[in-house]
Image (cartoon, grey):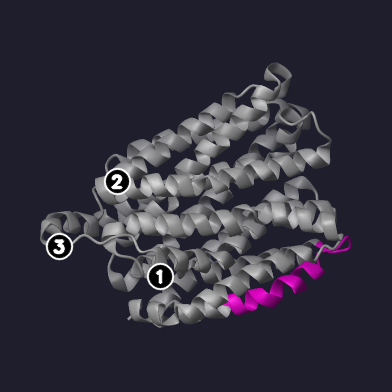
Amino acid sequence: MKTSRYQSYAALGNIIEWYDFTLYVAFIPIFSQLYFSQVDPATGIIIGYAVFAISYLARPIGSYFFGKMGDKLGRKATLLLTIGLMTLTMLSIGYLPTATHWGNSAAILLILLRLIQGIAAGGEVTGTFVYMLESCTKEKRGFFGALTWSFVSIGILLGSLTIMLVQSMLSPMHFMLEGWRLCYFIGVALGFLFFFIRLSMPESIDYSQLKKRQNEQVKQKASMQQIIMLIGLMATPASLFYFTFFYLPQYTQQYSNTNWPYIHILVAIVQLLGIGMMLFFGQLSDKYKSYPILLTSSILSLILPFGLLFVMNDNAHYFMIFCVFVLFTLLTMSYQGPLPSLMIKCTHIETRYFTTAMGFNIGFAIFGGLAPLISQLLIIQTGSLLSPAVYLLICSLITLATLFYYRNTIKNNEK
């Protein structure tokens, strides 16, 4: 019982990380007016997505630093540092003056704070995976890995619900001027609460055992092959995840004439459904292994997005839009559910934090962090609303190639 409670404590940081990312993406139209007002609105939106991508490209920096720290000083100490840094960054953004008061310096500081947030996030989610799965039985790693991801969904859900709540209490003008800051301050309060809860965690079971016998073993070095394999495996889930939850709402608003409050309700509903889907596929991987599930998901990701985007037109009904979101979520969760346990199985415990952090975050930075920006640019350049599906297809091909090339390695580690 205590172990399960401590595992939940570790996963709390995922809520803060993805709560913050949800706020930023939702507030890109606001930030484009408050911090990038020197350019036209369309360019401001592009800059907003570019800042999002830049912060994601900073995650590998955090992966390197916090990955080394997690393997040398321990999982707990590293997770305390990441959640503390993320919380302080949110506090700074909440108080950040706009371009009206500080001019271009305000925009530069916003970009800098997003970079710091990205660096901190580079050691958070994979550190949680490592801690959770090193503290559970090997037979349940698929389920507990999916449970870790579910806290990511809770963070996105909480962010969406917070925006809806604060918007309902304020006029559009007041929300744009000050209401968005209240959303950040709510996140700061949660961040400090979760930090103090994490203080009571013990070290992960596997890492504690490693430290006891470390003098008797030859130290392992981080494997570049393992990192490359993980980067390739991230292409499908990263692109799908960021397209579905961070770009598709904006896409729907822009091209399906769906009002703003409805979008956040929709995201909240599919996030709840997604948690159940993810736990199902995670548990399924404990029984049937991860490889066949990931292979099937990647194959479906080649074609299905074209059909789903085809129905996202100006005349699409709310129910049809809801079905599109549900199917994109199902596709995403079918891959994400089994993924964390596979990462742990395919890495050495001595370098596990570093290897998983680098592979995961480089993959998500390249294929996920750039997904909203590339999707928007593809539509602008081609004029086709189906063009983002081409990007998803390319990412799926990369993952399929990785699965085939490393199939023996993956299958042997899953035995």
Report, in whole angstroms, how far the alpha carbon at label 1 lies from the one at label 3: 24 Å
Q: Amino acid at mark 2?
A: Lys
* Residue depicted at x 12% and y 59%: 213
As helix, strand or loop, the secondary structure at mark 3 comes to: loop
Residue hosting label 3: 217
Q: Earlier in the sequence, mark 1 or mark 3?
A: 3
| Magenta highlight on residue 171 | no
Q: Amino acid at mark 3?
A: Gln
* Residue depicted at x 83% and y 56%: 381
Residue hosting label 2: 76
Q: Earlier in the sequence, mark 2 or mark 1?
A: 2
Mark 2 nearby-residue class (10 Å; few <14, some 14–19, many ≥20)? many
Mark 1 nearby-residue class (10 Å; few <14, some 14–19, many ≥20)? many
* Residue depicted at x 40% and y 48%: 64
Q: Which mark is residue 29?
A: none
Q: Is 300 located above or below residue 381 in the figure?
A: below
As helix, strand or loop, the secondary structure at mark 1 comes to: helix
Which picture quadrant has residue 141?
Answer: bottom left
Q: Which residues are magenta?
A: 297-317
In the image, 201 versus 339, the foreground residue is 339
Q: Which mark is residue 342?
A: 1
As helix, strand or loop, the secondary structure at mark 2 comes to: helix
